Image (cartoon, helix red, strand yellow):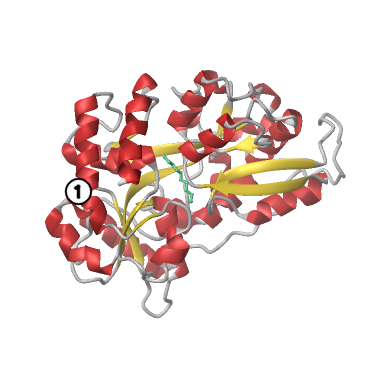
Amino acid sequence: MKRLSVVMLLLLALAACGGGPAGGPGAVQEPTAAPETGGETAGEPQLDAELSVYNWEDYIDEQVLRDYEERYGVTIVYDTFASNEDLLTKLQAGASGYDVIFPSDYMVAQMIELGLLAEIDVSAMPNFANIGEEFKDPPYDPGNRFCTPYQWGVTGIGYRAGHPGFEEAPASWAYLFDPAKLEQFSPDGINVLNDQRELIAAALFYLGHSPNTTDRAQLEEARDLILSAKPYWKTFNSEDYYSTLMVSDEIVLSHAWSGDTAQAFWTTFDEEAGTGNWLFAVPVEGAVRYQDNVCIPASSQRQATAQHFMNYLMEPEVAAAITNFTFYPSPNVAAEEFIDPEILNNPGIYPPPEVREKLQWLEDVGDAVFIYDEVWTAIKGQ
Ligand code: SPD
């Protein structure tokens, strides 16, 4: 654990970036006030027998789900998606059957606009008080009328420690777009996130534009940059890239989410060497900070049970178990005493203020979403 801290401090000094955390998967602790019941308890709704939960890959400790099932007698049907746009497509296709979903910031705004989310009542969720003020009442969901905060993080560059060329952290989007860097690293494998807004944002940052631009010319410039780099990329993967590409050394560089890279770091952690194989850099041109959320689709037929589950996810021990497993920061301040200190104090996971300052949210771009769709289709189609 101590050696891990040294690694992290070194990384921060190199490039205002972060790397792998300490602390293995955290076991869910016994809830402080766990009602042992088959479903209904005093003051709680009659719970449905089943709940369908749709989340990002590698984004929960599944023990948290098993504990909920045991405590409340609700069977959880769990499935994962690769991107906000995939989630949106599923919901728009109708009859998805999902009861709890985890969209990011800008997608929450889009879904509210499209009438796809059910209203919730945070005043009926006692554990909402555990969420830090910084994370409540976000611009994309004023008053938390639809969603509660889940986890947050940074999008940057994951890289294979010790690979020639990474003596210094690759803290620039040039590593994904500059022809010279691509020539250098492409033979050993580069992955980019299969995520429309994230990949276009990376190109926009590199070009010096806003990641939320609605300017067609700038978006076409980003499209052309991506198309010129695409032949050098081995994979578009935002689902299991950490487990199938990073830890197996199928690639040496990846457009990546901080927690996924930290999972790769920890999976490859070598006690003797005192480090893991995968580290994370925050590009100097700027990077995305996202907040993912827990929401209920308007089409859900089990909204009371869904809201009960949302409240459960905000129990301090539960939120901590999730962060101890996923290595993504929690907005739950009451959880902090249960989060592994090596994670909590790790600047690669909880970025310090000087790094946070450089980060930008992805926002709902309104009708320009059609330009983004058009650009994405061109990128994926060629
Ligand atoms: N493996 C879990 C990844 C979830 C990261 N959140 C995505 C944010 C997209 N803007």
Quadrant housing residue 246? bottom left
- Nearest the viewer among 103 and 226 is 226
Quadrant housing residue 290? top left
- Residue at disc 1, secondary structure: helix
Position of residue 108 in the picture relative to residue 168 (left or right): right
Position of residue 259 in the picture relative to residue 185 (left or right): right
Residue 157's place in the image compared with 38, above or below, is below
- Nearest the viewer among 317 and 283 is 283
- Nearest the viewer among 61 and 217 is 217
State which image quarter holds ligand 1.
top left
- Nearest the viewer among 83 and 296 is 83
Q: Residue furthest front?
A: 382
Q: Residue furthest left?
A: 180
Q: Tell me, yes or no, if residue 57 can be seen here.
A: yes
Q: Position of residue 122 (x, y in %)?
A: 64, 25
Q: Which residue is mark 1?
A: 228
Q: Position of residue 145 (x, y in %)?
A: 58, 21
Q: Tell me, yes or no, if residue 21 can be seen here.
A: no
Quadrant housing residue 52? top right
